[in-house]
Image (cartoon, helix red, strand yellow):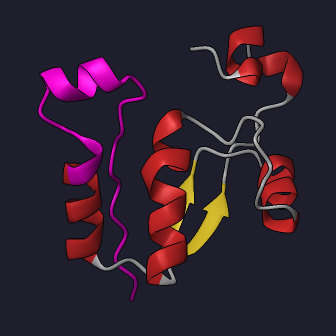
Amino acid sequence: MATVAILGTMHDENIRKQCNFTLDRMKDIILRFKPDIICGEVRPEVWNKYKSDRSYDGYLGPNEYRKMIIPLCESENIKFMPVDWFRDDMVGRYYLEGKY
């Protein structure tokens, strides 16, 4: 039997502060849950670029991934699985450029 938890995130720092749901708070929740794997809103092809070149500075999912989730997975040996499979024509230009 597996236990699955869904942790919603907010992509805007100001909204996170207003709701008292900071990256530190998200991190604490994740660490308390002790996941074996985190599935996240990162495109697989971009994740592969990052895995082959850690200096990759292109779009790597919403800002909480680069700022907290991916570093946390790396430091705590939590497997990360990218699960953003939207085709380019299904997402807006701002999504692809990381400007939302």
Q: At which x and y percent is residue 72?
A: 44, 67
Identify the magenta region. 1-24
- Count of marks, rendered view: 0
Outermost residue toward the front in this view = 55
Which residue is situated farthest in the top direction here?
Answer: 93
Q: Position of residue 84 (x, y in %)?
A: 69, 43
Question: Quadrant of the rendered structure where residue 79 is?
Answer: bottom right
Q: Is residue 19 covered in magenta?
A: yes
Question: Is residue 57 rendered to the left or right of residue 87?
Answer: left
Q: Is residue 79 magenta?
A: no
* Image quadrant where residue 48 sits: bottom right
Q: Which residue does the image show at 75% across and 45% down from the upper left? A: 43
Residue in the image at 75% along x and 41% along y: 57
Would residue 22 appear left or right of 53 to someone viewing this image?
Answer: left
Please tell me whether the stretch drawn in magenta is mainly helix, strand or loop. loop
Q: Position of residue 15 (x, y in %)?
A: 26, 20
Split into 4 quadrants, where in the image is the N terminus? Answer: bottom left
- As drawn, the residue found furthest toward the bottom would be 1
